[in-house]
Amino acid sequence: MNQYTHLSIFEREMILSLTAQKSSITMIAELIGRNKSTVSRELSRNTTRKRPYSPTNAQNRAVKQHLHGGAKRKVSDPKTRELVRRLFLNNHWSPEQISNRLKVENNAIQLSTNTIYRAIYSGIFDNKTKSNGYLKATRMLRHHGKKRHKRGIKDTRGKIVISHNLEERPEEANDRLVPGYIEADTILGKPGESCIVTLVDRTTRYLLAGKACKKASGPVANKMIELLNGLPKGWLKAITPDRGKEFAQHAFVTEKLDGIQFYFPAPHAPWARGTNENTNGLLREYIPKKADINSYTDEEVAINVMALNMRPRKCLGYKSPFEAYYETSLHLT
């Protein structure tokens, strides 16, 4: 006999077929290459007087027990469970980020990505609500995808005069080896209200962000200048925004930032600013779409930005953007 493995759906269908033919447990075990005690347990667990043996129901039951059982045991230690709860629910780290950052820090607690996923799906992190329902922790797992412009759709928002096309940006920006090449965008809450200007370094993924009173060229330009003026002299090299009209005053920003140039991608090409697009998606975990950004104080926005900068990233070898930007190492778990 080989080392034990769980019964497959094919083996369970064979058990059903042979049982219907009145075959003995010993014969069934020989035909499917299993120990007869395995077949006996399979039938006793999944057969009652009112419910005949069903391969599908038996398979579903086995999968459910496999997903829920082992994960609960591994995360049953209160210290381990609280660590995962804090990093996943409070800090919004993904299971992969948690697992690999624990390895990076040589933490005494070591969990695989799959173990954390199974624990989450088992329900041990679900929270009871006031209405006696449950807020499922699985809702905290990230979901990707957003609506894009379809081909042939014309932009009626008007166009801005650009200074440089993206193809003119220095080649070193594409290699992500040199920090200082910034991607810029805004995220909007309620239409016509405040927005948040987001500036992300392509190399370190370090985020600078702050509220502008309106998604308009003047307030956005002023906020960009305020955020970027605090960077070390000579660090900032170029800025890549989208072609939204909120960046129409880019020449004014260039003048105030000692000639730093803007490089614009083609219209409706968000992949050209993929780092910023991804970071905006992460920031939405704290500031959802259609939220009233006016209701968030500058301090709250700063706290959320810092939380993202402290979150380890796979692309950085599970260092955080803060560690990459400041070239340091911290204890994050």
Image: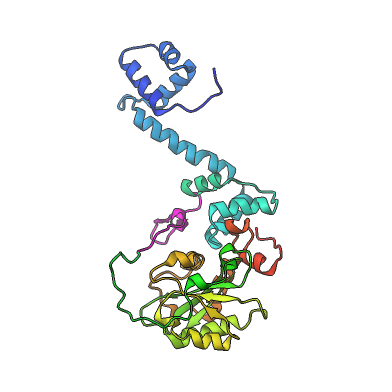
Which residue lies most toward the front here?
168
Marker count (numbered): 0
Which residue is at the front of the view, 10 or 40? 10
Q: Is residue 306 visible?
A: yes
Q: Residue 235, located in which quarter of the rendered image? A: bottom right
* Colour scheme: rainbow
- Which quadrant would the N terminus be assigned to in this image? top right
Which residue is at the front of the view, 270 or 165? 165
Which residue is at the front of the view, 101 or 228? 228
Instruction: Give left or right: position of 238 versus 63.
Output: right
- Which quadrant would the C terminus be assigned to in this image? bottom right
Residue 125 sits inside the magenta stretch: yes
Residue 169 sits inside the magenta stretch: no
Give the residue drawn at x 43%, y 69%. Answer: 288
Q: Is residue 256 above or below residue 42?
A: below
Main SS of the magenta part reads: loop
> Residue 245: image x %, image y %?
40, 81
> Residue 239: image x %, image y %?
53, 76
Instruction: Give left or right: position of 185 versus 175.
Output: left
Q: Is residue 194 visible?
A: no
> Residue 221: image x %, image y %?
49, 85
> Residue 200: image x %, image y %?
55, 71
- Region of the chain picked out in magenta, as a range: 124-147
Give the residue drawn at x 59%, y 71%. Answer: 306
Q: Residue 150, located in which quarter of the rendered image? A: bottom left
Give the residue drawn at x 70%, y 49%. Answer: 108
